[in-house]
Image: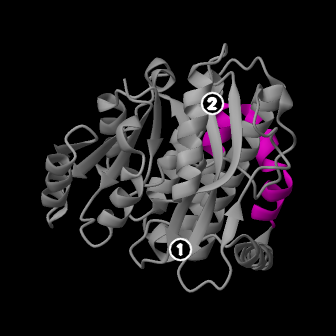
């Protein structure tokens, strides 16, 4: 059995997917690379098949009708045979030495007495044109180089949360929790980083800058103009995260606090994009989202609506919205997102 399965969701990725695949081949026979061609119309399928032919014991090409990023991840989970599972987007790549350390760590962990459900590492914002690369690291929030539970997780500041890029799940856990991401929907990586968490008992943090997250293409889903255009999909994911939270029977306060904090961030992003779109229809959608959260879970609604971010997102009138946008722009420069 392979140590690690890595799914690469690909849609018309011919221009950059080879850099991604080449960075992952360094893992050799310890890894299974699943290139998921999600109904591409360019040479993506051909490139995937070429890698599968050249590395038949490492690479598997999966071809499917277009179902969006989430369905490509679903295909990866369904086909994964490795003990652990990672998603690497086709325009991203990994750092060689960090990759080798992660594989060595996983090898050591599976021989140990405890099962680790989630391995966490750092990622780097490879923002095009940025003179300085922002690193998302967790060394002040998580114990390093040891197995720990949620009780050992310290307070995580608002700009410091786990994303798909920083996470390697135990494959069986993803099957057990029944994770199924929605089709034809962007921003489902937030569900991937959120929904399985109540099933995670043991974690391990490796302080290495493993994942390189590229930001800079105009058509990228995290581009602000693209996000405003696809705001209904952002709202859909936001609501699904609320639904997932509401279904949880929490036994750990730290986990619950972290998930509330994550939802606070996602709901704030939905709010800022709706305000930035500048239409009355968008402002109505913002009200409707809050009404949905209130209807689903009144306790959660109070936590989100009256948090620091919730209060800022709901400052009254045009002046209040202007102040909120100014604060967002400052945070954008500081944290390097979008």
Q: Is label 1 in a helix, a strand or a loop?
A: helix
Residue 107 % position (x, y): 55, 29
> Which mark's residue is nearer the viewer, 1 or 2?
2
* Residue 294 position by quadrant: top right
The magenta stretch spans which residues?
A: 291-315
**The C terminus, quarter of image:** bottom right
Residue 334 % position (x, y): 76, 74
Q: Does residue 131 appear in the picture of this structure? A: yes
Residue underneath mark 2:
197
Q: On residue 250, which mark appears? A: none
Q: Residue furthest top?
A: 113
- Out of 250 and 147, give the one closest to the viewer: 147
Q: Is residue 97 above or below residue 75?
A: below
Q: On residue 224, which mark appears? A: 1
Rate crowding at label 2 as few (under 14), some (14 to 19) or many (20 or more) other CA atoms within 10 Å.
Answer: many
Q: Is label 2 in a helix, a strand or a loop?
A: helix
Alpha carbon separation for disc pair 1 and 2: 28 Å
* Residue 311 position by quadrant: bottom right
Question: Is-magenta flag for residue 125?
Answer: no
Give the overall secondary structure of the magenta segment: helix
Q: Is residue 84 above or below residue 167?
A: above
Q: Does residue 165 appear in the picture of this structure? A: no
Residue 60 % position (x, y): 23, 41
Picture colour scheme: one colour
- Out of 59 and 135, give the one closest to the viewer: 59
> Viewed as shown, does residue 149 lie left or right of 291?
right
Q: Disc count in the image?
A: 2
> Viewed as shown, does residue 263 lie left or right of 273?
right
**Precedes in sequence: disc 1 or disc 2:** 2
């Amino acid at each position: 059995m392979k140590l690690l399965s890595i799914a690469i969701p690909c849609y018309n990725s011919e221009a950059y997917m080879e850099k991604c695949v080449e960075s992952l081949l360094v893992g050799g026979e310890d890894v299974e690379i699943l290139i998921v061609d999600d109904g591409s119309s360019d040479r993506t399928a051909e490139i995937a098949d070429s890698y599968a032919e050249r590395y038949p014991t490492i690479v598997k090409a999966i071809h499917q009708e277009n179902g969006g990023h989430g369905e490509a991840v679903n295909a990866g989970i369904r086909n994964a045979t490795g003990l652990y599972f990672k998603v690497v987007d086709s325009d991203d790549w990994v750092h060689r030495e960090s990759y080798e350390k992660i594989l060595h760590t996983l090898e050591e962990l599976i021989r140990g007495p405890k099962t680790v459900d989630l391995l966490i590492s750092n990622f780097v914002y490879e923002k095009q044109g940025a003179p300085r690369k922002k690193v998302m690291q967790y060394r002040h929030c998580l114990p390093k180089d040891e197995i720990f539970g949620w009780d050992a997780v310290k307070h995580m500041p608002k700009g410091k949360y786990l994303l798909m890029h920083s996470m390697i799940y135990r494959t069986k856990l993803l099957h057990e929790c029944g994770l199924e991401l929605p089709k034809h929907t962007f921003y489902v990586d937030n569900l991937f980083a959120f929904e399985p968490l109540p099933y995670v008992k043991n974690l391990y943090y490796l302080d290495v800058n493993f994942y390189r997250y590229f930001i800079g293409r105009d058509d990228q889903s995290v581009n602000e103009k693209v996000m405003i255009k696809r705001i209904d999909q952002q709202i859909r994911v936001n609501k699904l995260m609320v639904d997932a939270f509401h279904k949880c029977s929490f036994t750990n306060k730290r986990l619950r606090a972290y998930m509330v904090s994550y939802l606070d961030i996602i709901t704030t992003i939905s709010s800022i994009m709706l305000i930035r779109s500048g239409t009355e229809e968008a402002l109505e959608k913002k009200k409707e989202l809050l009404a949905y959260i209130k209807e689903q879970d009144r306790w959660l609604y109070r936590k989100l609506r009256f948090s620091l971010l919730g209060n800022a997102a709901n400052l009254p009138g045009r002046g209040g919205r202007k102040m909120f946008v100014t604060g967002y722009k400052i945070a954008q420069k500081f944290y390097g997102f979008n």
